């Protein structure tokens, strides 16, 4: 029985109509006069910190803590400015599942496992009125490597649920092969949803425990039995 469900954000719960990548571009323009700097980055399943590192390495810019802090301050500002200007959406089935899982509050906990920094995740989910649904999480500023985020989320969950939580009682829901790999890295289960850039066949071939076209296609009880 699943006791912890960790949700990815972009492409899984919401589409932000490119606000995230545009905010990266605005921040690159503001700080480095390179507004096209986001064009060559592959955002799917990546952590924000790994994207910044790739950009800095590509342009031979020395990475420092102060620079990273300044970048994400500017990025988050632009993200907050852009989200109300674009037509982002909560994806089908998300709110229904969250409501259903809330009814199981005594037996299942909801968390986030996302490449977004914690503040960027909050800005996005507050915009769609989803932030208050989650009790814990691991974020892109916890580690550059997404697989490491799974271990971090597991440790944090045990502080809430207890040390008896088993890896196979954890489910990661995401829309990319990196989400599936992330789950596999800790022995967790995965539900891959084809609402991002990858079709269900590709996600199934990556070894996902289950795949759906969209979260509206599966009931909460089915997810808990994966």
Image (cartoon, rainbow, N blue to C red):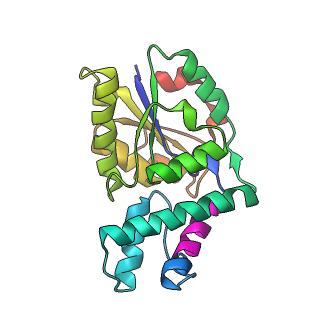
Residue at the spot 31% in from the left edge and 75% down from the top edge? 63
Q: Is residue 174 depicted above or below 69 in this figure?
A: above
Residue 24 magenta-highlighted: yes
Taking 165 as reference, is 208 left or right?
Answer: right
Q: Is residue 208 part of the magenta span, yes or no?
A: no
Counting from the top left corner in percent of width and height, residue 55 is at 42, 77
Q: Residue furthest top?
A: 106
Looking at the figure, which quarter contains the C terminus?
top left
Where are the magenta residues, as a range?
19-27
Q: Residue at x 53, y 65 (%)?
A: 75
Q: Nearer the viewer, residue 204 or 67?
A: 67
Which residue is at 31% across, 67% downward?
Answer: 65
Front residue of this view, candidates 98 and 120: 120
Asked if residue 200 is positioned above or below residue 161 in the image, the reply reads below
Which residue is at 35% across, 83% downward?
A: 61
Say which of 107 and 37 sits in front: 37
Residue 126 seen from this side: yes
Residue 194: x, y in percent? Answer: 59, 48
Q: Quadrant of the N terminus?
A: top left
> Is residue 206 visible in this depiction of the protein?
no
Figure quadrant of residue 21: bottom right
Instruction: Indicate the position of residue 94 as horizontal and vertical percent values.
Output: 63, 35
Q: Is residue 110 above or below residue 34?
A: above
């Amino acid at each position: 029985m699943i006791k912890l469900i960790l949700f990815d954000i972009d492409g899984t719960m919401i589409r932000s109509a490119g606000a995230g990548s545009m905010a990266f571009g605005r921040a690159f323009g503001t700080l480095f006069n390179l507004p096209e700097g986001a064009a060559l980055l592959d955002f799917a399943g990546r952590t924000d910190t790994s994207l910044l590192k790739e950009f800095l390495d590509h342009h031979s810019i020395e990475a420092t803590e102060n620079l990273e802090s300044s970048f994400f301050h500017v990025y988050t500002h632009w993200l907050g400015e852009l989200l109300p200007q674009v037509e982002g959406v909560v994806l089908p089935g998300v709110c229904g599942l969250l409501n259903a899982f809330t009814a199981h509050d005594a037996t299942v906990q909801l968390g986030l496992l996302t490449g977004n920094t914690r503040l960027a995740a909050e800005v996005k989910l507050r915009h769609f009125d989803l932030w208050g649904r989650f009790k814990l999480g691991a974020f892109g500023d916890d580690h550059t490597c997404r697989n490491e985020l799974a271990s971090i989320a597991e440790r944090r969950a045990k502080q809430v649920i207890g040390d008896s939580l088993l890896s196979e009682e954890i489910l990661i829901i995401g829309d990319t092969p990196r989400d599936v790999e992330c789950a596999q890295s800790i022995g967790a289960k995965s539900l891959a949803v084809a609402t991002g850039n990858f079709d269900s066949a590709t996600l199934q071939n990556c070894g996902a425990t289950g795949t759906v076209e969209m979260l509206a296609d599966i009931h909460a009880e089915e997810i808990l039995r994966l």
